[in-house]
């Protein structure tokens, strides 16, 4: 019996490693596919509205594709123009950084005379040179720019996903008995509704947050306000870590841009207050309990998907984990796994006497 358990654990480990290697090797195909799936969920209400108005399916899909293309083109333009502007302004930031380091080195040498010889040998300029900053910029944003080269692949996947939206319920009725088809159809609709609610709500909240941050930065004359807004929009798909990035990274550049530390501190505090207000007051009311993921699970998913697919993997980690949890909640045999994935220990609808639970697949 013990040998059987050991064999099962080893087999599960091998399967996990094999799946991870397959996901890593097929990143060029699977990453656009996953993004297309999420985009189909976000834009399905538009498709449904057009079909209810008796717009032909081909025209409806074309309008949805045009909308998605416009959104992706705007995002790619924001990233490209921000990188171009940053590259042009990089020498100015480098000069400002060199002055700050020289001042810091002089203050350290004056305050601690015994360390003057050691401070003199510190090679700050080489460690934070122009090539180092440029390389960091390329490593951080390169994956996003490379993704926009696969925009055609995303749109191609999106077409096939939208084409199968209307025919899937009819296929269920033809493939299964009426009672089984009705139960499966109810579960699929329930999963799609929950996933769509989470994705649409989270996207709208992040979009509002990014727009407000961009307006705040532009009103104080901060460089690259659109980029900081875009960074805030993407970063808040990553719990905790995203908030640190969307506040900490602009703060560093604010102190490099402005000669007045008081102004840089003021803008940083306003940015922090804005994002704390949205994250702790507005977002919980709008999102409700649609996430409810274990913090440890969030951390592990960020590490796993970040290792597999880089920056885009970290952005998509929590939406993918939330989708898996929602799926487990609607499949009776997988509900224990959904309970383990949740952050709270409160009973769900299926555990409360007298409260009706959503239909589930056995």
Image (cartoon, rainbow, N blue to C red):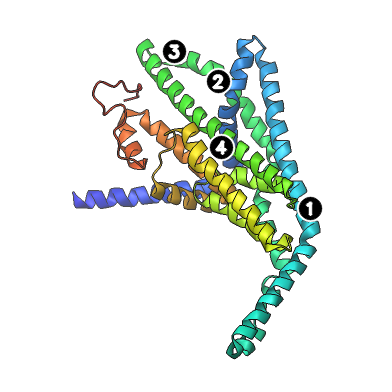
Indicate which disc residue 165 carries: 2
Q: Earlier in the sequence, mark 2 or mark 1?
A: 1
Could you give the CA–CA distance between mark 3 and mark 2, rounded to whole angstroms?
14 Å
Q: Where is residue 348 in the image (x, y as percent from the top left)?
A: 31, 31
Which residue is at the front of the view, 317 or 268? 268
Q: Which of marks 2 and 4 is nearer the N terminus?
A: 4
> Looking at the image, is mark 4 or mark 3 nearer the viewer?
4
Q: Earlier in the sequence, mark 1 or mark 4?
A: 4
Which residue is at the front of the view, 185 or 45? 45
Q: Position of residue 29 (x, y in %)?
A: 60, 41
Q: Residue furthest top?
A: 54
Left or right of residue 287, residue 250 in this image = right
Q: Name the residue under label 1.
A: 85
Indicate which disc residue 34 carries: 4
Indicate which disc residue 173 carries: 3
Find out whether the residues at labels 2 and 1 contact each other: C-beta distance under 8 Å: no
Could you give the CA–CA distance between mark 3 and mark 1, rounded to whole angstroms?
56 Å
Find out whether the residues at labels 3 and 1 contact each other: C-beta distance under 8 Å: no
> Looking at the image, is mark 3 or mark 2 nearer the viewer?
2
Q: Where is residue 157 in the image (x, y as percent from the top left)?
A: 62, 31
Q: Quadrant of the C terminus?
A: top left
């Amino acid at each position: 019996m013990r040998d059987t358990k050991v064999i099962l654990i080893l087999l599960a480990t091998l399967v996990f490693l094999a799946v991870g290697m397959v996901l890593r090797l097929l990143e060029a195909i699977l990453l656009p596919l996953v993004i297309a799936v999420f985009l189909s969920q976000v834009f399905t209400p538009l498709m449904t509205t057009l079909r209810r108005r008796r717009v032909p399916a081909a025209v409806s899909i074309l309008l949805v594709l045009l909308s998605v293309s416009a959104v992706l083109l705007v995002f790619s333009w924001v990233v490209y123009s921000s990188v171009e502007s940053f590259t042009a302004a990089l020498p100015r930031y480098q000069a400002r950084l060199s002055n700050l380091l020289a001042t810091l080195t002089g203050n350290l040498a004056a305050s601690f005379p015994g360390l003057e010889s050691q401070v003199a040998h510190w090679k700050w300029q080489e460690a934070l040179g122009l090539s180092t900053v440029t390389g960091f910029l390329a490593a951080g944003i390169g994956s996003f720019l490379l993704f926009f080269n696969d925009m055609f692949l995303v749109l191609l996947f999106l077409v096939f996903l939208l084409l199968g939206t209307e025919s899937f319920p009819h296929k269920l009725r033809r493939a299964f008995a009426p009672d089984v088809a009705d139960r499966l159809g109810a579960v699929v609709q329930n999963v799609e509704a929950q996933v769509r609610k989470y994705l649409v709500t989270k996207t709208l909240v992040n979009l509002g947050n990014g727009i407000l941050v961009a307006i705040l930065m532009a009103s104080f004359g901060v460089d690259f306000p659109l980029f900081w807004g875009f960074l805030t929009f993407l970063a808040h798909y990553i719990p905790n870590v995203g908030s640190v990035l969307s506040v900490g990274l602009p703060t560093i550049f604010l102190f490099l841009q402005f000669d007045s530390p008081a102004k840089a501190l003021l803008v940083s505090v306003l940015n922090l207050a804005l994002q704390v207000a949205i994250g702790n007051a507005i977002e919980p009311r709008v999102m409700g309990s649609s996430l409810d993921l274990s913090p440890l699970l969030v951390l592990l998913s960020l590490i796993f998907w970040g290792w597999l697919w880089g920056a885009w993997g970290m952005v998509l980690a929590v939406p993918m984990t939330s989708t898996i949890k929602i799926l487990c909640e609607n499949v009776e045999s997988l509900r224990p796994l959904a309970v383990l994935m949740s952050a709270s220990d409160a009973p769900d609808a299926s555990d409360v006497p007298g409260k009706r639970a959503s239909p589930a697949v056995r």
